[in-house]
Amino acid sequence: MINIDQKTHTTEDGTTVIVLTPSGRLDITTAWQFRLKLQECISKLSRHVVVNLAQVNFIDSSGLTSLVAGMRDADRVKGSFRICNVHPEAKLVFEVTMMDTVFEIFETEAEALNIQSSTTTS
């Protein structure tokens, strides 16, 4: 079982952003729960999601897959999917798999929540 803290943030321009902070391990035993949580948030609450990984000290390929799936869900509804506060031990996994070039990764939650500057439509 993975513990996922969820909060809602409203930006200055009125955009609702869901901030999810999972804690523990994001691996084959917990990734599906996290994936479902992402799907639920994107489909029902907001197409803008920030995942704060400060409390995830281990992530494996299934954890990365759940993040990729969340990013695709958000893209599909023209939303945004950002990651912040990547734990140093988890950061290595992102770098080795080149996922650090796939995701929008921010140092802090505050930076990740500063969405209005990047919601330009292409």
Image (cartoon, grey):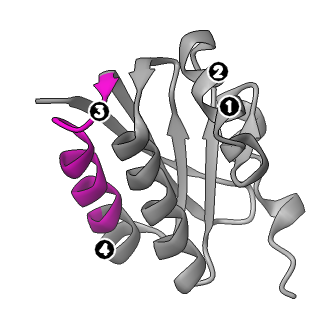
Q: Kindly report which numbered mark, 2 or 1, lies closer to the viewer in this rendering.
A: 1
Marks 1 and 3, how far apart in space?
Answer: 16 Å
On the image, numbered disc 2 is attached to which residue? 92
Q: Is mark 2 on a helix, strand or loop?
A: helix
Residue behind mark 4 = 44
Q: Where is residue 70 in the image (x, y as percent from the top left)?
A: 45, 62
Residue 117 shown left or right of residue 33 in the figure: right
Which residue sits at x=58%, y=28%?
A: 93
Q: In which quarter of the image is residue 21?
A: top left
What residue does disc 1 label?
96
Earlier-in-chain disc, 1 versus 3 = 3
Q: Which amino acid does label 4 sit on?
A: Lys
Mark 4 and mark 1 lie on one chain; the one further toward the N terminus is 4
Residue 37 in magenta stretch: yes
Tell me the amino acid under the disc marked 1.
Val
State the residue in front, 18 or 72. Answer: 72
Q: Residue at the location (29% across, 33% down)? A: 27
Q: In this view, does 113 lie above or below 15?
A: above
Quadrant location of the C terminus? bottom right
Element at badge 3? loop
Name the amino acid, label 2.
Leu
Q: Identify which residue is drawn at 63% across, 11% down.
A: 88
In magenta, the rendered stretch is 25-40
Q: Which quadrant of the figure contains the N terminus?
A: top left
The residue that label 3 is drawn on is 27
Magenta segment, principal secondary structure? helix
- Compute the Cα span from label 3 to label 2: 15 Å
Task: Name which of mark 3 and mark 2 comes first in the sequence.
Answer: 3
Is 31 drawn above or below residue 4 in the view shown?
below
Question: Contact, CB < 8 Å: mark 2 with mark 1?
Answer: yes
